[in-house]
């Protein structure tokens, strides 16, 4: 398959590995790129120096395109932009901020820019900013999430309606069937998070990967809606937040319970009790830790089987 | 297309019109059946006598199969079951209760039974109860909804994994693209609510239909989670509930704000301020009131166009 997403990013398969805090370092990103997808180094949990190290290692590990996911609200964002350009990264996925601020600088330096949105308002801002592609991420996605709670099935048609830009679906996708389904809605590629967070090459702690495998329906919940909504695994930390919210806690109290560094404690250091465990709803369907090679191979097989199954479908 | 859903219900298209309070009387149900889908009279907002009238009128209006959606928690459920059987209805969709209680009685009388679920726990109960088909309804659906908040994209693979029963997807479906997408996930048919609630033949008040057209992203919210979660349009009534919940209101206070008869007041009588306006997230994509004939025609055309677009898709 060739489409605007595979051509734009010069990749074999329209599969992007989402940039995820504490999961997607150089090892995961380069493995995904090496196997025909687009790997993204997640800058969200890195300082500029660490990001530089990961970029160097990723570029040494693969000659295929590898990108960076850059949350635009990072304090060091300006330094990071300069470094990404200087080190020769050619693909950046931005999120959590205004796409207008950095898109032109990146593009002037030959970097292709995609931006992650959860609603049409930001999709229109992407158009105005001149980004090259849009990632539309639904309610079922892990981590930070839109206030409208629009699910992927509902969001993709909304975004498709307001923009003709190349579109990548995200949220709830961990199989070739779901790839096929979201692409039939009008996406031209998918961004996959949770499934790659569980991969062998993910830098997440073994405890966190095991917790993904142990997840069942209802194991995650969109939480902290009075601050910034984030989808979390329901552990003890979550329960403390939930109980406080249930009783009407204000922002200040929630911030105090949240404290600092909790996602690192949970995802990277393996504290399953007090850590903040960000993962998507589809984690409940993941039942083994696999190398990226096997994951991508299976996605392709499932996609093609689904295509065969659906191809005679006519009403 | 022939599949287990079209054969089980003896319908041309695998399209079921969801039973909806105050929307799906005999007029909507018979129109959907007459146009090749499966129409369901929604008993949820009817007493037994009213249901009887609607069944009689529906059976007079079409010779094609027409069914009843029966929430099993209705006080008059036993009388309604007897009447449904006596009047010769051959298809019942049950919900909101244990599928074991009435399935056998219906089947012994030659009635085909489908049951609506939002999680695998109830899908397994459906298997044990021997129902003929399962409707899996995701988080984006209108009205009452599962506590796990599992979206349709995530839910269908879960249900498909635990049961081989014929499966109907519901929640977030108002286009042929979404039909195609959910069927590629393993569903063999779809149940459509919001789109038919907006149909000309729907018994909803004109104000409510206009409010569906006016909906945009974020216009609905899953609400009343301390009671039974229900997806509502954000009107003044919703805001009162939301404000109370935000401040930690207990069940008693919420029940008092809710009061009685609010869905009738909103959906049927057209009170857009104080009524309870149950609708799905996909309402935001609906932009005109159409007759059922046009709706089904468009769904088929969109499905077939999507099939053509996807048919050469291989990775």
Image: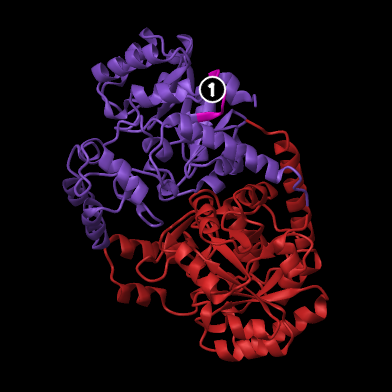
Chain colours: A purple, B red
Please state the horizontal and vertical placement of residue A230, each as a whole percent of the image: 34, 45
For residue A196, above or below residue B109: above
To which residue does mark 1 refer? A132
Q: Give me the residue at 48% from left, 15% from top.
A: A64
* Element carrying mark 1: loop
Kindly identify which chain the residue marked by label 1 belongs to. A
> Magenta residues: mostly which secondary structure?
loop
Q: Is residue A212 visible?
A: yes
Q: Give me the residue at 61% from left, 87% from top.
A: B80
For residue A190, above or below residue A279: above
The magenta stretch spans which residues?
Answer: A9-15
Q: Please tell me whether residue B55 belongs to the stretch shown in magenta.
A: no
Which part of the image, by quadrant, shows the N terminus of chain B?
Answer: bottom right
For residue B193, above or below residue B261: above
Q: Give me the residue at 50% from left, 25% from top.
A: A37
| Quadrant hosting residue B66 | bottom right
Please state the horizontal and vertical placement of residue B125, each as a whole percent of the image: 49, 72
Q: Nearer the viewer, residue B85 or B75?
A: B85
Left or right for B83, reference A292: right
Please state the horizontal and vertical placement of residue A275, each as a whole percent of the image: 22, 44
Q: Give the class, few, some or many, for how many residues have Cα within 10 Å of label 1's Cα (few <14, many ≥20).
A: many
Please state the horizontal and vertical placement of residue B184, each as a whole percent of the image: 63, 48
Q: Is residue A68 visible?
A: no
Q: Please tell me whether residue A10 belongs to the stretch shown in magenta.
A: yes
Which part of the image, by quadrant, shows the C terminus of chain B?
Answer: top right
Q: Nearer the viewer, residue B313 or B261?
A: B313
| Quadrant hosting residue A200 | top left
């Amino acid at each position: 398959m060739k489409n605007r997403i595979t051509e734009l990013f010069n990749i074999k398969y329209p599969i992007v590995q989402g940039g995820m805090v504490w999961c997607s370092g150089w090892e995961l990103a380069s493995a995904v790129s090496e196997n025909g997808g687009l790997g993204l180094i997640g800058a969200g949990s890195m300082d500029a120096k660490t990001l530089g190290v990961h970029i160097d290692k990723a570029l040494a590990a693969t000659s295929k395109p590898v990108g960076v996911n850059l949350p635009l609200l990072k304090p060091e964002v300006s330094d990071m932009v300069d470094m990404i350009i200087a080190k020769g990264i050619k693909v950046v996925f931005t999120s959590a901020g205004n796409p207008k601020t950095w898109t032109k600088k990146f593009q002037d330096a030959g970097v292709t820019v995609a931006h992650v949105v959860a609603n049409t308002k930001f999709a229109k801002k992407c158009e105005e900013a001149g980004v090259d592609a849009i990632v539309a991420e639904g309610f079922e996605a892990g981590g930070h999430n839109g206030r409208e709670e629009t699910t992927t099935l509902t969001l993709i048609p909304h975004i498709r309606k307001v923009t003709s830009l190349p579109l990548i679906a995200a949220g709830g996708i961990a199989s070739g069937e779901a790839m096929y389904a979201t692409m039939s809605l009008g996406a031209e590629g998918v961004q996959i998070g949770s499934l790659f967070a569980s991969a062998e090459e993910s830098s997440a702690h073994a405890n966190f990967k095991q917790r993904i495998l142990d997840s069942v329906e209802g194991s995650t919940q969109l939480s902290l809606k009075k601050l910034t909504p984030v989808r979390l695994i329901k552990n003890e930390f979550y329960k403390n937040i939930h109980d406080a919210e249930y009783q009407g806690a204000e922002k200040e109290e929630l911030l105090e319970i949240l404290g600092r560094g909790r996602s690192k404690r949970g995802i990277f250091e393996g504290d399953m009790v007090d850590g903040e465990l960000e993962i998507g709803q589809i984690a409940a369907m993941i039942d083994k830790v696999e190398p990226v090679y096997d994951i991508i191979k299976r996605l392709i097989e499932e996609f093609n089987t689904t295509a065969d199954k659906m191809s005679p479908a006519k009403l």
